Image: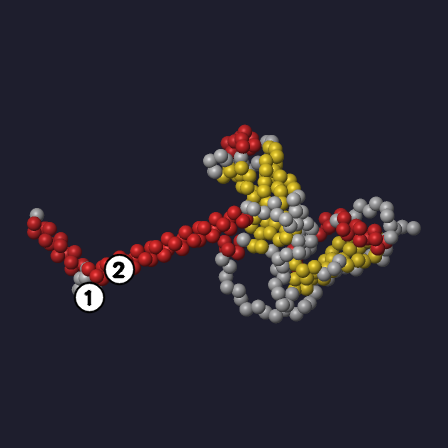
Amino acid sequence: MKCLFLLSILFALSSCDSSSNKTKTFGEIQAEIEASQKLFEENRQRIEAENKAREARLVEQRSYISARYVSVDEDFLDVELTNETAKDIDNVVGSLEVFDSDHNRVTSIALTNWVPGDIYLPRGGTTPARKSLALETPENRNQILEKASEYKFVYTTLRIQFVGENEINYLDAILKPKPAAAVKKINPVNQVKPDACGSNQISLETPEIYYPGPKCEHIARNIDSERFKLEYIDMCRSALGITEHMPSVAKVQVSSCIYETNRSGLSYRKRICCDMPVE
């Protein structure tokens, strides 16, 4: 047994730094340990700092809009969203999450409202939101039906744009975008070709509006529904000099969309076609 122990010691010594056949001194081993401990401590501090920054960012993301329970039935879970800021919210993208009393997530849904120029949630205002229960498991649906009023509802903002301000994008910090490529100079060319208003219509143009988004196509989303926008109806009534009720304007389209050359984003105008009264 004693011989076996000695052989084990010799084998251990010979395996130390086999590339140079030299065993490490106590000082070298101590230096390696200290270097390893230093690296571990630096990583620990970095992770703690990143976690604190992430927690602070999450608190900020959840401060813009609050959510409260309204009602639930077999098909839908209804909540009410409230603008908790002192500004009008033009556009917002976020997620509504539902937690039980043990802080376990019960369900969630992504909510998007991004229609430039159409105020989504004025300061202090509220708006309904709805979560379909169609895709929930029977067990989870029954749990929601029974305990929905006890749950905690949290709205987390991912992107938000206040009226007249640039977009705040929290996804940038999460996705870590690639380094920006060299910016190619773009000539200020109108990217859209609007139709002329009809012979029995008058044509009105909105003032030029700056939009920080990347594409002209975004401006035209849901544009047909803007025929019922009160602002455009009032523009037509004023231009035509009429006071009668006007349910909608004839047509709304993007008349110009020009990419900015000295900043990101674009500038656009909209054309409103108003039917002239029949004499």
Task: Using the numbered discs, state the Cα–Cα distance from disc 1 to disc 2 in whole angstroms.
Answer: 17 Å
Q: Nearer the viewer, residue 85 or 72?
A: 85
Task: Classify residue 175 as left or right of residue 44.
Answer: right
Q: Nearer the viewer, residue 104 or 145?
A: 104
Please, what secondary structure does the residue beneath circle 1 have?
loop
Q: What label sits on residue 182 in the rendered view?
A: none
On the image, the x and y values in percent for residue 43 come to: 37, 55
| Snapshot quadrant of residue 189 | bottom right
Q: What is the count of numbered marks? A: 2
Q: Nearer the viewer, residue 15 or 199?
A: 15
Q: Residue furthest front?
A: 86
Crowding at dot 1, Cα within 10 Å, few <14 / some 14-19 / many 20+, comes out as few
- The correct choice, above or below, for 100 with respect to 202 in the image is above
Which residue is pictured at 80% across the width and 51% down the height?
234
Which residue is pictured at 66% across the width and 53% down the height?
163
Q: What label sits on residue 20 in the rendered view?
A: 1
Q: From the image, tell me which residue sits under label 2.
A: 32
On the image, the x and y values in percent for residue 175 come to: 50, 55
Residue 262 in view here = yes
Q: Residue furthest right?
A: 279
Q: Residue furthest left?
A: 2
On the image, the x and y values in percent for residue 165 come to: 64, 56
